[in-house]
Structure formats: structure tokens, C-alpha cells
Amino acid sequence: MPDTSKDLIDIKSMTLPELTGFVTELGEKPFRGRQLYEWLHVRLASSFGEMTNLSKDLRSKLSQEALLVSARPAEILTSQIDGTQKYLFSLPDGNVIESVLMRYHHGNSVCISSQVGCAMGCRFCASTIGGKVRSLRASEMLEQIYRIQALSGERVSNVVVMGTGEPLDNYDNLIRFIRLLTDENGLHISQRSVTVSTCGLIDKITLLAQEKLQITLALSLHAVTQEKREKLMPIAKRYPMDRLLEACREYFQVTGRRVTLEYSLVKGENDSPEDAAMLGQIASGMHCHVNLIPVNPVKERSFRRPDHSHVEAFRNRVALSGVSVTVRREMGADISGACGQLRRGYLDEKKKTIDNAGSGSVTAGGAGSKEIDA
Ligand code: SAH
């Protein structure tokens, strides 16, 4: 589908002062900017028609000049175990992205994608298989949260940028997204309730620290030596581990925020007792928390997770160094698959449809066997 939106102004990515400037240029009073902002970021409107306190004239001007970015749910999977939901959203240009709603005692958490696909190439990750298609706009990141809150009717209190994509490879849009998401005039999610996960782009971590945000930075470490890390994460070749860890220590010094080290446990690759001891040693030299993630098998890859007792032994060994370490609780095990797999399933089905029918058309929810309850 062609992207017809190119020349329209992406108003959902605008700050309140920017939006006020935009409506004034359209010949409106400045307070209309605040009204429009509220429709976009508090009432989560998905059409100009809903904006009933704006004049018909303004609404019609907006529909000619402005782009109202919206994410349309193409598929929603709901876990029968814990209510976790996976959303596959389609974007106006025909791309699809996925997001997850996790329901915890302390509130609802949404995991969003920051790019369509990913260029980083981590060997165990489904999101990177077809490469990066494009980065998401701030509005497209916000939309995942807004649509989930509107569709579920439940308040979202935590956001993790841990879905498809490398957020720091989409830096400017990411920062804009965080500022809009946490703005007191918008949804006003606390900065402390936002986590950004990175595979470790050192220069961008240094920049991020200077933004003085109170968000949590999570580093995907996954290995304890440079050599092992390069094997699992090709991008590591560009970013030496000692400098990367130094950037994380600096991040703490500048922001006062403890960093999370993520470590996906892959059977036979990074799960030995020596790995655990070294991980403990690395972590004890930093103000950090360690989160172990038994790897989610990806059908295109051969990586397996260690069994439960092995994971526990690994955790205990890391804890011997006195660091705080947890094993990530698996949510939505019955609908799971690693991040990026729902989108991959959709793309595989689409390819099959094209191969079989020789036509480019595919309907929303075309991922065949999956349950569609929206
Ligand atoms: N690009 C960012 C964020 C996206 S991935 C990053 O690398 O951090 C979020 C986390 O899930 C990362 O720690 C990533 O390495 C991990 N991950 C990806 N695929 C996984 C899989 N199959 N099993 C377990 N963890 C995985």
C-alpha cells in the first residue's frame, strides 16, 4: 500500500508548544492547541470526528493538513493462563508491528516495538530475521500504548521498550516519545515506570545519560566476554565490552538510576558455572540489577533454554557475588513465542498467500491458525 501520508503533519508526534504553533498557523486561537493535544494524548481519539469541542471548520482543516497516526489491531491473542495479550497492529503504510500487554499485581505493563524489524542481528532473536524495514515515529510508539489502553479499557502504568527494534538506533524519535508519554498534559506515565532496553550502542547511551531522564536503562549483555558476546550478538564487534560497561557505570553516575543487565540464558552457550561467576563479578562492580531470561526458542534458530534447575543454579551462583538477580517470569506462555514471532508468523502467512495465489492481497488477521478475538 503506498504511503499517502508523506506531506501531512504528524500532529501526534508534536509537543504542546509545537501543536499550539501549528493550530495558530491554521488561523485558530492558541487554546485550540491544548484542546487538540488533550484529544490526542488524554482522550486517545482515533478520528477527527470524535473531537466534538473543535469546530467543524477546524476538523475539516485538520483532516486536510494533519496526519492522525493510528494503529489498527490486525490480531489480538489472549493468554488463558494470565491474561497477557499480544497485539499485532497494522500501520497505514501496510507494515505490521507487535506489542504486548502484561497484567501484574502492581499494574499493567505494555511492551512496545521501536522499529519495524531490526538491523542488529542478535542470533537468538526473531525480530532481526528479515532485517530492519524502518524506524517508528514517536506517534507510532505512543499509539501502541494508547490503542491498548483504549481497547482494553485498563490504565497502562508501565512501559518497556523491549519489543522489536533497537530503540537507540531510533534515538530522536525515542526521546520525543518518552517526553510525550511522560508529559503531565498527556497520559503522564511516570519516567520511573519506563524502561528502554538496548543491545549496547555506547555513544547513544552516553547521549541518553545527558537527557537526565529518570527512566531505567536495560543493557542486553548476554555474555561475559567480548568473544562470546560477538558470537551471540554480531553488533558487539563495534562496541568493546569494557567501554560499554563503563558507559553504563557513567549512566548511573549521571542519572542516579540503577541499570538492569539482561542475560538470556542459552543452553551450552552462556550458561556454565564460570559464566555465572563472571556475571556476578561484572555486576558487583556496578550499581545494577541482573535479569536472567531463559531464551525463548525461535523456530528459525536452534538455540534452546537450560532446564529449570540449571537456571536456578545459575541464578544462585550469580547471587553469591552479592548482586540482586532475578529470573524473568514468563508471561503468556500459551501465546508466547519470542518477541517478533507474531509478526514473523504473519509475514510467513502473507508470503504463502502470495506464493499460492500469485496476488499481493492479504486480509488482516491472516496468520491462519491463531485465535482472533477482536
Ligand atoms: N534491541 C533491544 C530491545 C529489544 S529485545 C535490545 O537488544 O535490548 C528485548 C530483550 O529480549 C533483549 O534483551 C533481547 O536480547 C531479548 N531477546 C530477544 N530474543 C530473545 C529470545 N528469543 N529469548 C530471550 N530473550 C530474547
Image (spheres, rainbow, N blue to C red):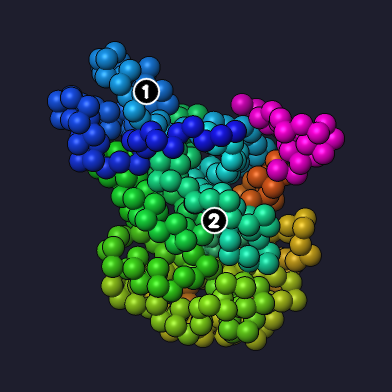
Task: Decide: few, some or many residues near mark 2? Use Cα within 10 Å; few <14, some 14-19, many ≥20.
Answer: many
- Which amino acid type corresponds to the residue marked 2 in the rendered image? Gly
Residue at image coords 51%, 82%: 240
Foreground mark, 1 or 2? Answer: 1
Q: Nearer the viewer, residue 35 or 87?
A: 35
Residue 329, given in percent of the width and then of the height, sits at 59, 56
Which of the 4 quarters of the picture holds residue 81?
Answer: top right
Tags 1 and 2 touching, CB below 8 Å:
no
Q: Which residues are magenta?
A: 347-374
371 displayed left or right of 244 = right
Q: Quadrant of the N terminus?
A: top right
Q: Nearer the viewer, residue 231 or 307?
A: 231
Residue at image coords 49%, 32%: 4
Indicate which disc residue 63 carries.
1
Indicate which disc residue 165 carries.
2
Q: Is residue 281 above or below residue 111?
A: below
Residue 257, given in percent of the width and then of the height, sits at 34, 67
- Which amino acid type corresponds to the residue marked 1 in the rendered image? Ser
Report the number of discs. Answer: 2
Which of the 4 quarters of the picture holds residue 150?
Answer: top left
